[in-house]
Image (cartoon, helix red, strand yellow):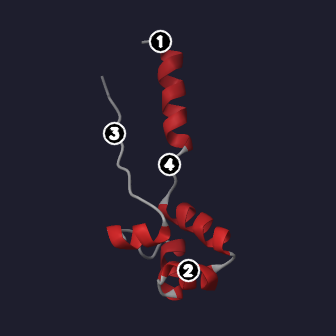
Amino acid sequence: RDENVDHLLGALLMASLLTLSDAVRIVVERHGGTRAAARATGLDKSFISRLLNGHKVHPSENTLKLLGLKSVPFYEVIE
């Protein structure tokens, strides 16, 4: 495959992937703040803050589902 194609595919993949804190930040912003996100998701406000600040890094699948997120591992072919 062409090197440019590999670069484009990598860029497309990375464009849709976010860190956990960035993804949670988007959810919080969509709800209008941490309190509103807590009310909408049923999660504790302080728990959401810990996710935002990186103090909690491996939330359960159920927590991710409540936030409207999912964890997606990815891999790179190294020859």
Q: Residue at x 32, y 28 (%)?
A: 78
Where is mark 3, residue-wise? 75
User: Which structural element holds mark 2?
Assistant: helix
* Figure check: 58 above or below 12: below
Return the residue found at the far top: 2
Q: Which residue is drawn at 63% across and 82% down?
A: 36
Residue 3 at x, y percent in the picture: 49, 16
Residue 4 at x, y percent in the picture: 54, 17
User: Which structural element holds mark 3?
Assistant: loop
Mark nearer the viewer, 4 or 2 = 2
Q: Which residue is drawn at 45% across and 76% down?
A: 55
Where is mark 1, residue-wise? 2
User: Given the image, on which type of amino acid does mark 4 rest?
Assistant: Leu
* Figure check: 28 above or below 38: above
User: Given the image, on which type of amino acid does mark 3 rest?
Assistant: Tyr
Mark nearer the viewer, 3 or 2 = 2
- Classify 10 Å Cα crowding around label 3: few (below 14), some (14-19), many (20 and above): few
Q: Locate residue 73 relative to residue 54 in the image: left or right.
A: left
Question: In the depicted view, which residue is nearer to us: 13 or 36?
Answer: 36
The numbered dot on residue 40 is: 2
Q: Label 4 vs label 3: CA separation?
A: 13 Å
* Viewport quadrant of the C terminus: top left
Q: Residue at x 44, y 72 (%)?
A: 66
The numbered dot on residue 17 is: 4
Q: Label 3 vs label 2: CA separation?
A: 33 Å
Image marks 1 and 3: residues in contact by CB distance under 8 Å: no
Return the residue found at the far right: 32
Marked residue nearer the N-terminal end (2 or 1): 1
User: Given the image, on which type of amino acid does mark 2 rest?
Assistant: Ala
